[in-house]
Each structure stands twice: as C-alpha cells, then as structure tokens.
Image (cartoon, helix red, strand yellow):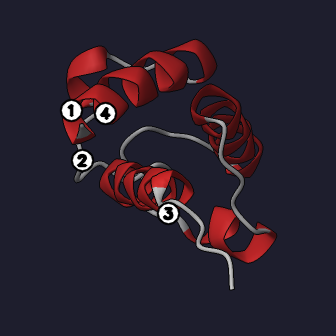
Amino acid sequence: MEQEILHKARDIILDIVDIEREKIVPEASLRDDLQADSLASVEIVMALEDQFKIQFDEEQARSFVTVGELVAAIEAMRCINATPKTSV
C-alpha cells in the first residue's frame, strides 16, 4: 500500500516541482532535497489530499518535512477512514 502511495506522491510532486524522479525518495526533504518552497509544499499536500480523499488539519499539513512522513500520514489517514464506525 505504501508503495502505491509513494508512486502517486512522486507523480504529484513531479507536477509541482521541477526535480528528477529518482530524487523523490522517502527520506527526501521537501524543502532541502526537492527544493519545494512553502507554496509548493502546500500545493503538494493539497493535491495529495484530493488524490487520496483525505483532509489534514492545518497544523499537520505544515509539519511534513520528508516524503516519507507524507506517505506515512496518508497511509494512517486511509486506515482511519477505512475503519468501520460503530454505533453506540
């Protein structure tokens, strides 16, 4: 599942930031390694939210440093959203 998310995240990052695909690895820093400024980082997060039908709160959206953190957060959100709700 994480590989699928990473693959889609790479495609989105490539659409927003002019960087080589090989550089988009889980340990890559959005700012330092991928040269994504704050606007590009926001665009990446918003595009990922649209792609995966999830919503991060504002504080969390600003806290992502690496591609791996983004992928892990998306995976976690998808698991939470997939968990059936029980009625009380």
N-terminal-most mark, 1 or 3: 1
Quick check: 7 above or below 70? above
Secondary structure beneath dot 2 equals loop
Q: Which residue corresponds to mark 2?
A: 26
The answer for how far apart the CA atoms under marks 1 and 3 are is 18 Å
- Quadrant location of the N terminus in the rendered image: top left
Q: Mark 2 or mark 3, which has the lower sequence index?
A: 2
36 or 47: which is nearer to us? 47
Residue underneath mark 4: 6
**Residue for badge 3:** 80
Q: Quadrant of residue 10?
A: top left
Which quarter of the figure has residue 6? top left
Q: Earlier in the sequence, mark 4 or mark 2?
A: 4
The answer to whether marks 1 and 4 mark residues whose Cβ atoms lie closer than 8 Å is: yes
Frontmost of labels 1 and 3 is: 3
Front label number (4 vs 2):
4
Residue topped by disc 1 = 3
Residue at image x 29%, y 48%?
28
Q: Comparing marks 3 and 4, which lies closer to the viewer?
A: 3
Residue at image coords 41%, 61%: 76
Q: Quadrant of the C terminus?
A: bottom right
The amino acid on which the numbered mark 1 sits, given as a three-letter code, is Gln
Q: Residues within 10 Å of mark 2 (few under 14, many from 20)?
A: some
Q: x and y percent of residue 4 in the render?
A: 28, 27
